[in-house]
Amino acid sequence: AQKVTQAQTEISVVEKEDVTLDCVYETRDTTYYLFWYKQPPSGELVFLIRRNSFDEQNEISGRYSWNFQKSTSSFNFTITASQVVDSAVYFCALSEATATDSWGKLQFGAGTQVVVTP
Amino acid sequence: DAMVIQNPRYQVTQFGKPVTLSCSQTLNHNVMYWYQQKSSQAPKLLFHYYDKDFNNEADTPDNFQSRRPNTSFCFLDIRSPGLGDAAMYLCATSRVGRKETQYFGPGTRLLVL
């Protein structure tokens, strides 16, 4: 069963618009870790944020903000005033603390392609 | 700057000809991972090393092997590449597994002719 769902395959916006990427996860663990990564066309996966399950405080970093809601198992990501350089694929990922089937494994969502046009 | 380095960035090989991809890190992390990423898909974990302990994913083909001669270096060997092995190969490192952030290298894009 898919543990991380990114329902949006592609989002296209015009520069300066805000864009919100949805991420819904599924886990039975009470302790887990959520991540967002950015993958620009060059291919490198760039770490953006890590959130622990016991810390529901939302976070803002420049034009990026994250909304973590355990009640709905969601960890959404918003880019404010988007720029062309934000064009990339964004992956949400889950790491479970007690999973025994594969230690150290990141469960990735399918990714959301963001296209920002001038 | 501390980082994860992958060489080469692009690799072309022939069908059935062994190929080795390399990864090095200056982060002094004890865990190193290899992922395969095909076009428009999420990265898929192939295996990882925790120090010298090798951990293979159940569905990783036998055609893929790995070596970690020391803390800094890790190699991915594809013994007989097939056309279906053409992909981006990503190396990542972390201090420990589940709760620590994985940091990725720039990847090696493999083309099989």
Image (tube, rainbow, N blue to C red):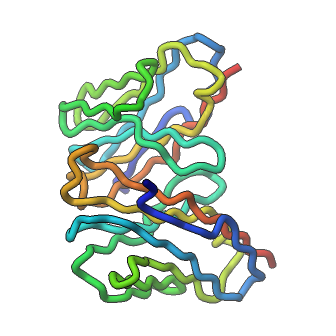
Q: Quadrant of residue A9?
A: bottom right
- Foreground: A37 or A23? A23
**x and y percent of residue B43 in the render?**
50, 47
**Eyeballing the image, is A11 above or below A67?**
above
In the rendered view of the protein, which quadrant contains the C terminus of chain B? top right
Task: Tell me where residue B92 appears, x and y as whole percent.
Answer: 38, 46
Left or right: residue B5 versus residue A98 is: right
Which residue appears at 61% of the width and 59% of the height? A40
In what quadrant of the picture does the N terminus of chain B appear?
Answer: bottom left
Q: Is residue B73 visible?
A: yes
**Residue at horizontal 43%, vertical 51%?**
B104
- State the image coordinates of residue A97 (x, y, percent, origin top left): 21, 60
Say how many tags the image has: 0
Q: Observer-nearest residue: B50 or A67?
A: A67
Does residue A60 lie above or below B106 as drawn? below
Q: Quadrant of residue A27?
A: bottom left
Whether residue B95 is visible: no
Determine whether, in the image, residue A100 is placed left or right of residue B62: left
Relative vertical location of residue B52 with respect to residue B5 in this rendering, above or below: above
